[in-house]
Amino acid sequence: MSNENKNQKNEVNRKIMLNGNVSESYIGSIVEKINEIINIDEQKMSEDSNYNPKPIKLMINSYGGTLHDANMLIGVIESSTTPIHTYCYGKAMSAGLYIFASGHKRFTSPLATFMYHDATVGFTDTVEGLKASIEQSTKLRDRYDNYIVSRTNLPKHIMDEKKKLKEDWYLSGEEAIGYGLADEIIEFRTK
């Protein structure tokens, strides 16, 4: 077997799919895969100063989920020494949009749909417990908004208006490019 074939056989799979709801167990398994790749890359970088890790490709197709779990994945992406590129071919909504925005480089299909909305809450608690939960949920939502604003050109006043009206804000792939949510359109084949 040639060296080239051995290298291809030993190459780490750098494609990871987030295809479903953002939840503790699902995000945990994605973080494990990303950390395995990062550990391999960090080991190779310590052995070879010229080693340049290939990006991890995180494909997102999600209606969203919990912001706390999204924060875990975003924290890993933000601190990764290996570039993590996010891709959206279908949908990146709510917490999925949040995660998509964290990519070191972000790619969208022309057919992709993105959606921003106010954080949703579902509480069963005492009155005092509800007060504390609402305060915490507001802080979490504000961090979400501030992060989105820091990573994109989505206007905060439109985000605030959508929250006030209790409306979802849908964006196409082209609009995502225009608002700086995505960096590049994934071109379709010509034939």
Image (spheres, rainbow, N blue to C red):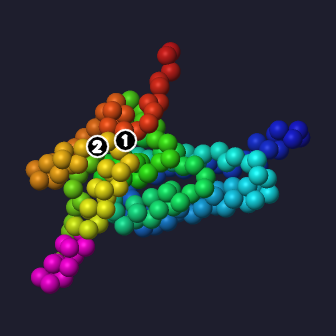
Q: Tell me what residue is drawn at x 53 percent, y 60 percent.
A: 79
Sequence order check, earlier mark of 1 and 2:
2
Q: What residue does disc 2 label?
A: 154
Give coordinates of residue 150: x percent, y percent: 36, 51
**Image position of 12 (left or right of 68):** right
Q: Quadrant of residue 3?
A: top right
In whole angstroms, how far apart are the C-alphas of marks 1 and 2?
A: 7 Å
Give coordinates of residue 2: x percent, y percent: 88, 38
SS of the residue under disc 2: loop
Q: Is residue 136 magenta?
A: yes
Q: Is residue 122 magenta?
A: no
Q: How many marks?
A: 2
Amino acid bearing label 2: Leu
**Disc 1, disc 2: CB below 8 Å?**
yes
SS of the residue under disc 1: loop
Amino acid bearing label 1: Leu
Give coordinates of residue 142: x percent, y percent: 26, 61
- Other-residue count near label 2 (Cα within 10 Å), few / some / many at <14 / 14–19 / ≥20: some
What stretch of residues is rendered in magenta?
126-137
The quadrant of the picture occupied by the N terminus is top right
Q: What residue does disc 1 label?
A: 181
Q: Tell me what residue is drawn at x 31 percent, y 56 percent.
A: 146
Q: Residue extending furthest right?
A: 1
